[in-house]
Amino acid sequence: MRRIKTVLQLLLLLLVLYTVLRLCFWQAHFSKGISAGELGKIFYWGLRLDLSAIILVNIPLWIYLLFFEFALRNRKTAVATGLTILILLNLPFLALNIIDLAYFGFNLRRNTIDLFSVLSGSEHAWTMFLSKFWYLIFLFLGLSFLLWLIARRILRNLVYHPERKNDVREKGNLIAIAALWVIFFLLVRGWSARPLTPATPLLYLPAQYQPLSENSTITFIYSIVRHQSSLEEKRYFTDSSLDSLFTIRRQYASGIPFQRKNVIVFVLESFSNSLVSKNSSFKASTPFLDSLMNESIVCNNAFANGLESNKGLVALLAGIPPLMDEAYYNSAYSNNPFRGIGTLLKEKGYSTNFFMGASPDHFGFGKLCKLVGIDHYYSEKEYGNPNDDDGNWGIFDHKFLPYSATVIKEDKNPSFSVIFNVSSHHPFKLPADVASRVTIPGQNAEQNSITYVDYSIRLFFDSIKSTDWYKNSIFVFVADHALTWDIKPRKVLYSAFQIPFFIHLPESNSSIEINKTVQQLDLVPSILDLMHYEQPFMSFGRSVLDSTDSFAVNKIFGNLQLMDGGFLFGYNAENDQPAYYYNTVSDTALLKNLILEEPWKIQGKRSEKKLKAILQRFNNSLLKHQMLVH
């Protein structure tokens, strides 16, 4: 029984450490607005998931302590071996949970295996991250030492007592060990009909508090199990009825010949709509962007399809919603044939370019460019002057954007170009030579970085506005994602996705406001619509000028979401049931879940039907290679 006691003591020790980290996570991200009743449920499910994670991670340790009696004959060796196994198994996962005390504020989800792709594309940024959140290193060292100190004392009490195999006590020990493994199995799996997963608390908690009930260990392990796993074929609707509900075949036959306009898409790093909206109290000083928006097609109700750059860029350039946990180009389905925006325009004689002042293939964007048909990738390597590097992400915008203009001006063919700026990203570093010009009294560091990007974009336009092709161009401005670290819990379900999206046509000095729901997926259809592209193509979005439908789809906290006509519908595909339904116009704080109310019976059911149609089209198109549209 001494061995079982040792196992339970170590389990309790680890559970205490996980609880401490959950308390820290609560204070860091959810300290306000949670009732005592909700908090009790959150911590109950947190305890369930912590036990599941700890037991899974430490299976080799339990096996060693419970079954390898011969290794426990020498107490010194037994303690050293047990401590080594314990430390090697648990310290990496403690580190994951500690990292999320800060990193969660940037991507609004617990760590998954996708962290490795972030690390590989952002080496300098992680150095910056650790320098800013240096106290996390001391927290990690402190908890590691505490774990080592207490675990060593627990293991020292483990002494081998040889017993005869037919001894009644030995039989009792075996029964107790067997019972312990049964209990462990139930704690890991759960005792309901469906297995316990990170999504299980969604059945009992408001969706916005799901991350607080989770731990980064269980989400990481679960993402490994599901990584590049096969999508499930959906059969909500027959093929014929699905075509009438949602199709990805788009075609705009206006009768006007195709217009060979230059297209330049500015992907604005971490731009929340509140930073540029004229009605926002958080608006930064952006005089140049303001002047462009006064003569543009402005989408006032635009949403991102993802919370990270790799998800947003897939939606923008591929027209594919980021409904998987991993980026599309890192998934098992990246070999699906389809004609991306670059491929479509190259067929019309265009050159295709991607500009980003970060490292080559940063975040895997080089792979995405190949998938969508963009041939030329310009990074800090092509720029060629490391003295202009900001030390975190890449070349300062006021240097790299004019460089991009120089390259584009040399194109003899009409061009499609994507320019992804880097400077409006934490830590919002400003170059010394222009810092005083873009530092505005009363603005914080984030707002000043937006002002700096505005200045850099003006330099780009100053460089090209005298060219012959300037007025024969389409300029699109859209964010890769919003900045999320300072958004409050309840409203985050939709405010975390609000982004700027506007289209500037120099040949027109009029302004058009579009108030319907718009999403990143609408970028490619909108460009092709404005160019009077007459051939069919694939997209999950629609032109912003198309009045037949308007919606936005995204994923947060394990739920798929549909934003449609002032309502927000959340659906948990894993549990296959609706999670929430909010009126975002009359209930901006998202306090009243209408899932059981009268509005759900009509409008809510329509939202559920549409989201299921989108999900079925997404899954089945990838499974059956049906994304190639001619």
Image (cartoon, grey):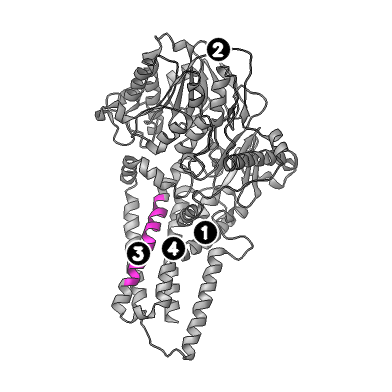
The numbered disc on residue 87 is 3
Label 1 or label 3, whichever comes before in sequence order:
1
Report, in whole angstroms, how far the alpha carbon at label 4 lies from the one at label 1.
16 Å
Is residue 83 inside the magenta stretch?
yes
Instruction: Tell which of 420 and 437 is nearer to you.
Output: 420
Is residue 487 inside the magenta stretch?
no
Report, in whole angstroms, how far the alpha carbon at label 2 lies from the one at label 3.
65 Å
Do labels 1 and 3 touch, CB within 8 Å? no
- Please tell me whether mark 1 sits on a helix, a strand or a loop: helix
Q: Position of residue 567 (x, y in %)?
A: 65, 37
The numbered disc on residue 380 is none
Label 2 or label 1, whichever comes before in sequence order:
1
- Residue 617 in sight from this viewpoint: yes
- Please tell me whether mark 3 sits on a helix, a strand or a loop: helix
Above or below, 41 against 249 in this view is: below
Give the residues drawn in magenta, as a range. 81-99
| Residue that badge 1 annotates | 46
Above or below, 457 against 197 in this view is: above
The numbered disc on residue 510 is 2
Report, in whole angstroms, how far the alpha carbon at label 1 lies from the one at label 3.
23 Å
- The residue that appears at 58% across and 12% down in the rendered structure is 257
Query: Which circle, 2 or 3, is nearer the viewer?
Result: 3
| Residue that badge 4 annotates | 57
- Please tell me whether mark 2 sits on a helix, a strand or a loop: loop
